[in-house]
Amino acid sequence: MLSMRRATRLSVCFLTLIFVAGLALAETRKEFRFTVGPNASISVLNQYGPIAVKPSSNNQVTVIAILHSDRVEVDQDQSASRVEIRSHLLPGANAQSGQVDYEVLVPAGASVNMYSPTGPLRAEKLAGDVSLEGANAVIDVHDVSNAHVHVKTMNGPVTLTNIQGGHVEITSVSGDVRLTQVSGPLVHVSCTSGKIFYDGDFGAGGQYSLISHSGDIEAIIPPAASFDVTARSMKGKVENDFPFQPKSHTSFPLIQGSSFAGTIGQASSSVVLKSFSGKIRLKKR
């Protein structure tokens, strides 16, 4: 009888612990609203979890946060039109219990700064400057116009789609970078070992530089594209599908199969493709 009572007490304690642990990991939804003026600036810093930013239809910033446990809080601060949201980890928090999922609605022209080591990070249909940073975060930006788009990542892949009139700067260590219909006065991508893929037209009047130390670079361009191009791989191969007018003077010796420099069409944009050991391919769509 005594053994049965002890077993019953142990079972009750065990079930209680499971119930308490379940409560600690239960999700909580919180919503915050801020009224801002023109040229608003919004920062969201999240140690664990995704951040998605979309445009709102008014002058309010709306933050929807899903907290995965009671081991994390959301700190908020507003000063005039500057809003900062930050995940605050409590003692004992880890990657699971410290996760917060953010969905943020901002005025379309607001400047946005997003940081999460784990991500993913996503921004869409904005007209203000966007800065995204994450070590391993998957980064996706699309349908942004006339804005600065700055991306920094270690290993996470980066995808930019339909960025028009943008000032784009991407820095990656080993994450691959994919650009589709990205054009503007400045488009600069720098990778250490990540691959770079560009599918677009090197839009009129822009300066484009795609640089990877050991990763391959591939650009797919329509036949009617017009640009000035320099392509060089120190230890890799260079392939080109376009007829071009060679440059008479270059800052480096031209070696067939490893480099070329010339003008395609009317040369409305400047393009530099450079790698140390990766393969460079300039293809017709």
Image: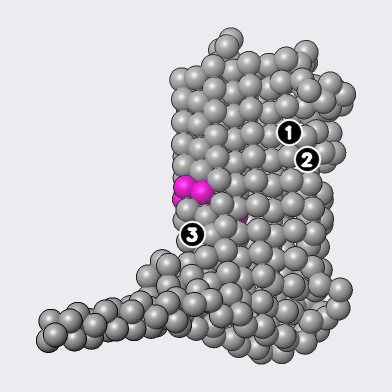
Q: Position of residue 76 (x, y in %)?
A: 59, 86
**First reached walking from the N terminus: tag 1 or tag 3:** 3
The residue singled out by tag 1 in the image is 199
Which residues lie in the magenta part? 151-156
Residue type indicated by callout 2: Gln
The disc labelled 1 sits on which kind of residue?
Asp
Residue shown at 63% from the left, 62% from the top: 131
Discs 1/3, front: 3
Say which quarter of the image contains residue 250.
top right
**Residue 181 disc label:** 2
Instruction: Determine whether, in the image, residue 51 is placed left or right of residue 39.
Output: left
Q: Residue at x 55, y 45 (%)?
A: 157
Q: Secondary structure at mark 1?
A: strand
Query: How far apart, in angstroms, are the residues tagged by discs 3 and 2?
Result: 27 Å
Tell me the residue that label 3 is attached to.
118
Instruction: Report if residue 172 is visible in the image.
Output: no
Write the residue at 66% across / 77% down.
64
Magenta run includes residue 275: no
Q: Is residue 269 left or right of residue 239?
A: right
